[in-house]
Image (cartoon, rainbow, N blue to C red):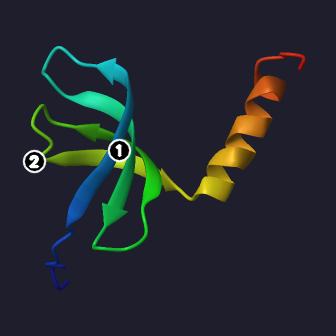
């Protein structure tokens, strides 16, 4: 099996919020990120303290995040 060897570049456009911080210094954050120079997307991901290493996460377009936002009250039985 051939090993994939590629580079991913990112730019943090806006730091929105920290969702959780581990004792090891990593933080799960919601940020607006440009991946490889593309248009920014909303991103929930693990980051090390100085944002030089990333962990697994999810990336959302604005439209996808709006759908999630509209769905969450149903998940938590919240009336609007």
Give residue 17's quadrant in the image: top left
The count of marks equals 2
Question: Which residue is located at x 35 percent, y 20 percent?
Answer: 20
SS state under label 2: loop
Give residue 30's quadrant in the image: top left
Say whether marks 2 and 1 touch (CB < 8 Å): no
Left or right of residue 9, residue 72 in this image: right
State the CA–CA distance, disc 2 to disc 1: 16 Å
Left or right of residue 31, residue 7 in this image: left
Image height of 38 relative to 56, above or below: below
Question: Which residue is located at x 35 percent, y 55 percent?
Answer: 33
Numbered tag placed on residue 14 in the rendering: 1
The spot of residue 61 in percent (x, y) is 57, 59
Left or right of residue 72, residue 49 in this image: left
Numbered tag placed on residue 52 in the rendering: 2
SS state under label 1: strand
Q: Quadrant of the C terminus?
A: top right
* Crowding at mark 1 (Cα within 10 Å: few <14, some 14-19, many 20+): few
Mark closest to the chain's N terminus, 2 or 1: 1
Question: Which residue is located at x 19 percent, y 28 percent?
Answer: 26
The spot of residue 73 in percent (x, y) is 79, 25
Q: Quadrant of the N terminus?
A: bottom left
């Amino acid at each position: 099996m051939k090993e994939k060897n590629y580079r991913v570049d990112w730019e943090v456009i806006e730091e929105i919020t920290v969702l959780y911080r581990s004792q090891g210094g990593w933080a799960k954050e919601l940020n607006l990120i440009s991946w490889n120079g593309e248009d920014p997307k909303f991103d929930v991901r693990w980051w090390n303290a100085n944002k030089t290493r990333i962990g697994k996460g999810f990336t959302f377009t604005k439209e996808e995040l709006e759908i999630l936002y509209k769905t969450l009250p149903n998940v938590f039985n919240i009336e609007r």
